[in-house]
Image (cartoon, rainbow, N blue to C red):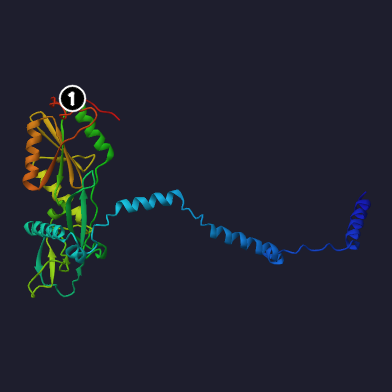
Amino acid sequence: MEYKQTGKRKNRLNDEDTAAPRPRAVRQRPGLEESSAPENNSSRQEEDEETKDSGDSTPPVFWRASANAVEAAVDLSEPSTFEAAVSGPDQVHWRKAIHAELESMRLRGVFRAAKLPNGQRAIGTKWVFKIKRKADGSIEKYKARLAAKGFRSKYGIDYTETFSPVVKHVTLRMVIAISKHFGWPIDQLDVVTAFLYGVMKEQVFCVIPEGVELDSTFDCLELVKAIYGLKQALRVWNETFDEYVCSIGFQVSDFDPCLYIKTSDGHCVFILVYVDDALVTGSSLELIAQTKNDLKTRFEMTDSGKYRSEESGANGAERPKRVEQKTLAQ
């Protein structure tokens, strides 16, 4: 039995040895067939040329949408430089806006003239011009803002900490839900040039901005208050607002650092802050009015009126009800 199997194996090997060698398949590189067939190559080139000449190069839908969005976001009448603003067709309006910005900084003591110390460097500044328009497209206001080139700031020299809390969405929904349940009014406040209230902790110098003239003995400005563009500007403003609100009897919520709570004679009032916007609500109209007056004595604010939603009528929310003990679960 073993011999027969061996013999069969040998016969198989012999057959393979005597058989004619199989031709090896030639592997062709990509494009070899096209190069060996010139008639096909020329026809394809003609088809490509016809496609190009047809002019059917319609951009995709997403490209058109993004291009329209960019065109709508950019106002061509807004100058990009200081020289363009003060020499363009709307120079009268832009000069007034620049003067208003510099005057606001002067009244708040944002910077003072200085001589740049040895080993220190001054960061650059830039004017940003924006046109605020109404719903019908007409011009409402010309705005000029002086910003620092904070991207050139160095960590450990020009700034140390930059973190600033932002209100949680669940906190916003909770405050609105509570106010609607009890019929509390919600007032909206907006701090004007909020960042200019924050006092700088680091010693930061900036170059003399365009439009500012100083005596020849000074070659830079020292920033006393934070301005837009600085990496720590938002944090400095938040610390300034937090310090004042706590000084008038409010406590910071353990759940959200952007929620402030104050209780008095069985009533309570909430302040919810988001950067430079604030919502004030509570169970007492007198306590709400007092809180708003306290905030306006410290910061320049615009009162946007009552918060309105589908549940409230045309005249705003109802008169507050006295708070009862309730438990909220989520």
Question: Residue 185 appears in which quarter of the rendering?
Answer: top left
Task: Please provide percent x and percent y for residue 176.
Answer: 22, 33
Q: Examine the rendering and report whether any part of residue 60 can be seen.
A: yes
| Residue at position x 82%, y 63% in the image | 23
Q: Nearer the viewer, residue 317 or 158?
A: 317
SS at circle 1:
loop
Q: Is residue 200 left or right of residue 136?
A: left
133 shown above or below 173:
below
Q: Which residue sits furthest front?
A: 54
Crowding at dot 1, Cα within 10 Å, few <14 / some 14-19 / many 20+, comes out as: few
324 shown above or below 207:
above
Q: Examine the rendering and report whether any part of residue 29 can be seen.
A: no
Task: Please provide percent x and percent y for residue 111.
Answer: 11, 62
Task: Please provide percent x and percent y for residue 128.
Answer: 21, 59
| Residue at position x 71%, y 66% in the image | 36
Task: Please provide percent x and percent y for residue 44.
Answer: 64, 61
Q: Nearer the viewer, residue 285 or 308?
A: 308
| Tag 1 residue | 325
- Amino acid at circle 1: Gln
Q: Is residue 122 left or right of residue 3?
A: left
Q: Is residue 71 left or right of residue 165?
A: right
Question: Residue 120 appears in which quarter of the rendering?
Answer: bottom left
